[in-house]
Amino acid sequence: DGGITQSPKYLFRKEGQNVTLSCEQNLNHDAMYWYRQDPGQGLRLIYYSQIVNDFQKGDIAEGYSVSREKKESFPLTVTSAQKNPTAFYLCASSIAGPYNEQFFGPGTRLTVL
Amino acid sequence: DAKTTQPPSMDCAEGRAANLPCNHSTISGNEYVYWYRQIHSQGPQYIIHGLKNNETNEMASLIITEDRKSSTLILPHATLRDTAVYYCIVSNTGRDDKIIFGKGTRLHILP
């Protein structure tokens, strides 16, 4: 089945540690996105990539880093510089550009202790 | 900031039509109206989008006013499974535009 997978579903880390969240898609989509969601809030864009080996900062990129070495994969690293990393992280992909339908993964809930 | 305004919550009786309003008074000519929904603790799901004309698919209908400053998402026969947060989004056809998710409308379907 085609879709987007994120792993793990729940992740716990100690404060000061970097952590990498996985996002894989087999939809052959060019564009991929990372969002952060806090309780009771909408989604905020962290980073997005429209093509392999290229990515742009979203609205809240500070404290995060990404890579796009393969079309299928867009991992997100939450660094120790992110002041409040505990949140629900969602990955999405689309055919090309944000104006097309975005397909979302199930999300990773990160808790920093 | 989101380019849309939605009521924070709404109730609808099961089996009735749910009509979710959205104001987008600053929408420009090349911007589409998109609707997504998010069931608790899941990723958002695309519902429908439109530019000028009304649209219908297997999930919902989208009614856009003639001046395009507002729209209504209609779920014709709401079920308990339709309980979710519904996001109305405007986005243009430019490749660099970013989709901005506001807080959406929390729809409660009442049995």
Image (tube, grey):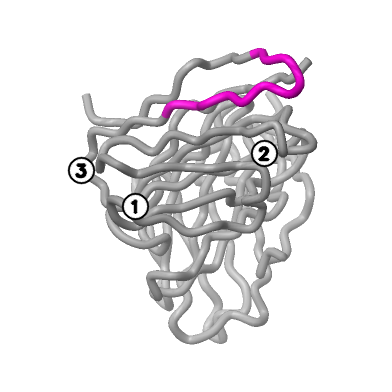
Q: From this view, report whether residue B90 is shown above or below residue A13.
A: below
Magenta span includes B7: no
Q: Position of residue A71 (x, y in %)?
A: 25, 43
To which quarter of the image does residue B73 belong? bottom right
> Which sits earlier in the primary sequence, circle 2 or circle 1?
1
Q: Amino acid at mark 2?
A: Gln
User: Which chain hosts label 2?
Assistant: A
Q: State which quarter of the image contains the N terminus of chain B.
A: bottom right
User: Which chain hosts label 1?
Assistant: A
Residue A37: mark in rendering: 2
User: Which chain hosts label 3?
Assistant: A
Magenta span includes A17: yes
Q: Find the magenta span and give its range.
A: A12-22
Q: State which quarter of the image contains the C terminus of chain B.
A: top right
Q: Amino acid at mark 3?
A: Asn
State the residue position of label 1.
A31
The one nearer the camera, A30 or A79, is A79
Q: Position of residue B56 (x, y in %)?
A: 37, 57
Crowd tier of the residue under label 3, counting other residues whose Cα lies within 10 Å: few below 14, some 14–19, many 20 or above: few
Q: CA distance from mark 3 to mark 1?
A: 9 Å
State the residue position of label 3.
A28
Mark 3 secondary-structure assignment: loop
Q: Residue at the spot x=66%, y=70% of the render?
A: B3
Q: CA distance from mark 2 to mark 1?
A: 20 Å
Q: Residue at the spot x=58%, y=68% of the render?
A: B71
Disc 3 and disc 1 on one polypeptide chain: yes
Residue B99: mark in rendering: none
